[in-house]
Image (cartoon, grey):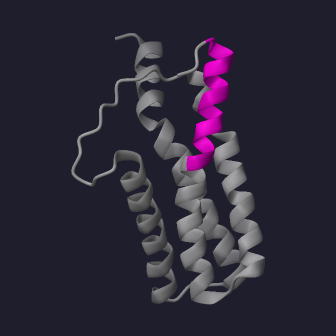
Amino acid sequence: MNPRRRLARNLLSESRAYGYTLSIWGGGGLLLTRFGTPTAIDVFAYVGGAIAAFALLALFTFGDFVVEPDMTREIRATSFVHVVATLGNLIVSYLLTFVLHGFVAFLVVGVQTTFTYNVLLLPEEYVAHLIGGSVR
């Protein structure tokens, strides 16, 4: 087994989840810092908001919830780090904690974390393809 090839496969399979995990955890951490221990309703609002945003993005992207997407595409290593998607997302979450309070803050940050992270991946991947010489 070639260790570099195995590492490359690991990075490919983990890259999207890693940035999203940092974003969703970071958004939750910001909410905890600002508002303290959440109630059960707050937790369900945060997670429910994230699920709702993911469902809406999937519906918008695929046009249906039962479609099997064709995922054959190139991935560039330069788009793995997700600096813009992760840090940009956390900045939005941070600012929202000063505008919103309680249940609404948890709900909106949950929605925005999923939505903003996925939308900010688009310019990251576009730039990665520009650097790599091909844009689709």
Foreground residue among 32 and 114: 114
Q: Which residues are magenta?
A: 119-133
Foreground residue among 130 and 5: 130
Residue 80 in view of the camera: yes
Q: Is residue 20 magenta?
A: no
Q: Position of residue 59 (x, y in %)?
A: 36, 55
Where residue 105 sits, quadrant-wise, is bottom right
Q: Quadrant of the N terminus?
A: top left
Residue 50, above or below 85: below
Q: Is residue 132 magenta?
A: yes
Foreground residue among 4 and 126: 126
In the shown orientation, is residue 74 left or right of residue 26? left
Residue 81 in view of the camera: no
In the shown orientation, is residue 21 left or right of residue 90? left
Residue 55, above or below 20: below
Foreground residue among 99 and 65: 65
Q: Position of residue 24 (x, y in %)?
A: 55, 60
For image coordinates 64% across by 34% down, the residue present is 124
Residue 54, above or below 39: above
Q: Position of residue 86 (x, y in %)?
A: 65, 49
In the shown orientation, is residue 78 left or right of residue 66? right
For image coordinates 38% across by 60% down, the residue present is 55
In the shown orientation, is residue 61 left or right of residue 127? left
For image coordinates 35% across by 46% down, the residue present is 62
